[in-house]
Image (cartoon, rainbow, N blue to C red):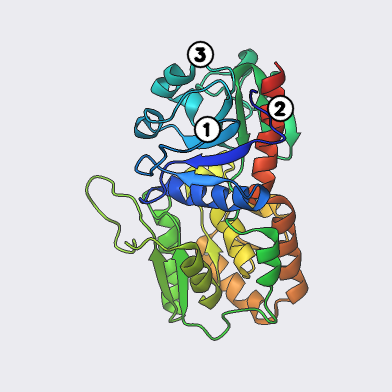
Amino acid sequence: MGFDLKTCKIIVWGMKDRYCTHSHIHEAIYRAAKHMRPNSEWLDVESNFTNVDWHNTLVITEHKPSLLEKLPIRDDVFYVVHGMNDNAPSRERFQNVKLRLSWNVFHDYSHVYGTQGNPVSGTAMGVPVTDVMWLGEDTPLYPNENHMDFRWATDLLPHEIEANKPKQILGRDAKTIHYIGTQWWVNQVELNQFDKACKENHICFQPSGAGQVMAQQRHPIWGIRVASIEENMRLVRESFMAPALSGSHHLTEGYVPCRIFKNISYGQPYVTNNLRAHQVLEQKGIFNPDPYKLFYDARDILKEYPLDYLYAQMDLVARKHTYINRIEGIMKAAAIIQAK
């Protein structure tokens, strides 16, 4: 018996017991996979996988060589590898594997350029490509390249989002904003602008997370802790508001951060300077492209913010932006690739 999508189990491979930005993604994918198929597993290179039954398995992983070199290559396994087509060692590792799928995070130009940085079918930026199948909203598949794109999502499941619906808008008496996410040179200007407004209102803007170091200099407001899902959710719910701030590069390419989906699913209205995120979320939250002005807008609007508005945001995320949705997209793409 070979690979069967209808009965396969899911194994998330790598980054289980270490910190990397992608470890958060793997944990979220695993939570959704376990909900969908209870025999799903999350294994790492340090795991004891000697007795693992790899038969009829969908493996979801990342392109790091240290992960892939210990991953068994079998004809009855379907491999879904983040960044495979962008990474030469990964392409070489899977070049003779039929059941393979590369994936990247979707942004507004990801369906214009090929997965190795070259225009698809000779098109120019801004012109839709012809070599693409749209499996859903913001979910293109390039069957000739064995590649797909999809957006990040919240790490919660729909029933958990429903359980998080508060009886009133949270954080009105709080004096702290916990910002848990990547803080680096790409968004430091925007974070500083928002922090300036916080200071003027005696609100402590407290970033947490790994951050990234550029030129051996750590930005002065960068945090150093990595928060679990449970702590992340608690801190967001305790915050005066829950901003999702993007830097110029992400704003230019139309990237939507997972932070905004998480904040909503945890029970806070979204507050963002990201127009594309505002559009994806059907303009149901608070938006201003200027992070400094955004704080003041949100401060005033949240004083009398209708619960129905928040519930509409939470329902939208539960319906369209969980990793159950993303795995369902992967399954559609895998079926098409397998049938080629």
Q: Secondary structure at mark 2?
A: helix
Tag 1 near tag 3, CB within 8 Å: no
Q: Which mark, residue 65?
A: none
| Disc nearer the start of the sequence (1/2) | 1
- Residue on which the image places disc 2: 335
Between marks 1 and 3, how big is the CA–CA gap?
19 Å
Kind of residue at badge 1:
Trp
**Which residue lies at the image location 71% right of the left edge and 63% below the top edge?**
313
Side (left or right) of 172 relative to 339: left
Side (left or right) of 133 relative to 32: right
Q: Nearer the viewer, residue 304 or 178?
A: 178
Nearer the observer, disc 1 or disc 3?
A: 1
Q: Is residue 257 visible?
A: no
Kind of residue at badge 2:
Ala
Figure quadrant of the N terminus: top right
- Residue on which the image places disc 1: 54
Figure quadrant of the C terminus: top right
Q: Dot 2: within a 10 Å radius of its alpha carbon, few (fewer than 14), some, or many (20 or more) residues?
A: some
Tag 1 near tag 2, CB within 8 Å: no
Kind of residue at badge 3:
Asn
The residue at the far front in this view is 51
Q: Is residue 98 visible?
A: yes
Nearer the observer, disc 1 or disc 2?
A: 1
Q: Nearer the viewer, residue 38 or 331?
A: 38
- Residue on which the image places disc 3: 96
Between marks 3 and 2, how big is the CA–CA gap?
18 Å
Side (left or right) of 324 relative to 100: right
| Disc nearer the start of the sequence (1/3) | 1
Percent x, y for residue 270? 62, 64
